[in-house]
Image (tube, rainbow, N blue to C red):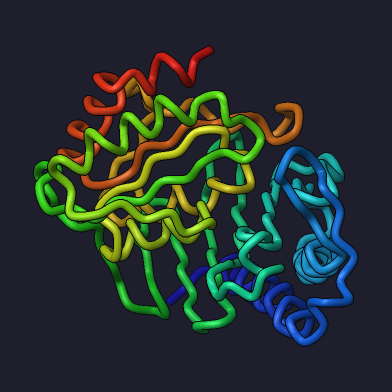
C-alpha cells in the first residue's frame, strides 16, 4: 500500500495531467514563450503547475514548492519539486510523449517520486527504501552487464549545443555495441523507462532539478545506479541552485552504468561537458 503522501502526490499529478489533456484540444491557440534558446514554455505548463500545487498545498499547507514555471515558493522543511510538463516541445507538436513529474525532497534527498504519463495512464511511483511501482506493479531495471545489444536513451540540451560534436562522437562509439539509441524528449520518462526495463540505460547533461528529482529515485529504487559523467554519485539535491542548476545523469543497472560512463569518458564527452 502506498504511503498517504504518495497518494497526495498522485492526486496532484493527475490534476496537472487533466489540465494538460484538456489543453490538447486547443494547441493552435496556446500562448507559447521561448524561455531560452530552443527552450519553450506555454500557458498550459503554468496551469498544470498551479493545479498540482493546489492539491499539494491543500494537504500540506506548510510545504515549499520548486516548480519549473513558478520557481521556489515558501520555506518549508518539505519541498515538492515539480515539472508540470516534461516534454513541452513534444506536447506543443502533438507528439505523444510527455509527462508530469513530482518529487518530495527533504534534507536534500528525494523521499518520494511520481512520474505520470496521462496519455497512457501510466503511473510510476517510488518511495525511498520501498521500491518502484508502475501502476501498482513492482518493476526493476534490466540487469545488463555490458553495452552489447542494449537500447539506450539520451538528449541533446537545447540551451547548449557546444557539446553536440562530443556527444555525437559518443553516440557513434556506443553504436558499435548497442542495438540502438533513442532520443525521446522527456528526461523524466527516460528515467522511468530505465526503471521499468523499457530502456537499458540513459545519459544526458544540462538537466534541471525538476527534470530528474523523481526519475532518479525511480531508478535507484528499481535496483539501478545513478552517477555523473565522471562516475561520481550525485550529492544532495540543491533546490537553491539558480535556474534549477545543471546536472549530468548516467542511469541503468550497476554494471551497465560502469560501462556506459567509461565510454562517455573515452569519447571525450565527459571532458567537453565540464567546459
In this view, 128 is above or below 60: above
Q: Position of residue 80 (x, y in %)?
A: 69, 52
Question: 109 and 173: which one is in front?
Answer: 173
**Quadrant location of the N terminus?**
bottom left
Q: Position of residue 127 (x, y in %)?
A: 45, 58
* Residue 192 found in image quarter: bottom left
Q: Residue at x 30, y 41 (%)?
A: 225
Question: 220 and 60: which one is in front?
Answer: 220
In this view, 188 is above or below 39: below
Q: Position of residue 82 (x, y in %)?
A: 69, 54
In this view, 124 is above or below 165: below
> What count of labels does the image hold?
0
Q: Residue at x 12, y 53 (%)?
A: 149
Question: 199 and 115: which one is in front?
Answer: 199
Q: Residue at x 34, y 43 (%)?
A: 251
Q: Position of residue 171 (x, y in %)?
A: 31, 38
Q: Is residue 225 left or right of residue 191?
A: left
Q: Residue at x 56, y 24 (%)?
A: 162
Amino acid at each position: 500500500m502506498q504511503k498517504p503522501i504518495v497518494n497526495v502526490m498522485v492526486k496532484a499529478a493527475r490534476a496537472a495531467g487533466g489540465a494538460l489533456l484538456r489543453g490538447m484540444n486547443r494547441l493552435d491557440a496556446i500562448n507559447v514563450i521561448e524561455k531560452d534558446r530552443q527552450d519553450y514554455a506555454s500557458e498550459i505548463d503554468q496551469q498544470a503547475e498551479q493545479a498540482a500545487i493546489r492539491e499539494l498545498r491543500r494537504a500540506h499547507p506548510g510545504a515549499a514548492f520548486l516548480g519549473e514555471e513558478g520557481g521556489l515558493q515558501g520555506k518549508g522543511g518539505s519541498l515538492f519539486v515539480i515539472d508540470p510538463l516534461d516534454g513541452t516541445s513534444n506536447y506543443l507538436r502533438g507528439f505523444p510523449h510527455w509527462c508530469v513529474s513530482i518529487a518530495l525532497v527533504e534534507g536534500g534527498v528525494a523521499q518520494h517520486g511520481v512520474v505520470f504519463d496521462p496519455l497512457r495512464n501510466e503511473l510510476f511511483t517510488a518511495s525511498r527504501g520501498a521500491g518502484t511501482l508502475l501502476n501498482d506493479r513492482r518493476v526493476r531495471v534490466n540487469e545488463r552487464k555490458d553495452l552489447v545489444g542494449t537500447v539506450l536513451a539520451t538528449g541533446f540540451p537545447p540551451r547548449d549545443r557546444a557539446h553536440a560534436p562530443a556527444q555525437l562522437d559518443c553516440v557513434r562509439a556506443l553504436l558499435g555495441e548497442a542495438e540502438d539509441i533513442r532520443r525521446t524528449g522527456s528526461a523524466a520518462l527516460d528515467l522511468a523507462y530505465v526503471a521499468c526495463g523499457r530502456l537499458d540505460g540513459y545519459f544526458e547533461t544540462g538537466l534541471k532539478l525538476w527534470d530528474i528529482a523523481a526519475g532518479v529515485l525511480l531508478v535507484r529504487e528499481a535496483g539501478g545506479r545513478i552517477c555523473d559523467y565522471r562516475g561520481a554519485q550525485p550529492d544532495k539535491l540543491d533546490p537553491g541552485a539558480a535556474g534549477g542548476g545543471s546536472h549530468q545523469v548516467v542511469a541503468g543497472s550497476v554494471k551497465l552504468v560502469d560501462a556506459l560512463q567509461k565510454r562517455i569518458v573515452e569519447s571525450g564527452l565527459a571532458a567537453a561537458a565540464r567546459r
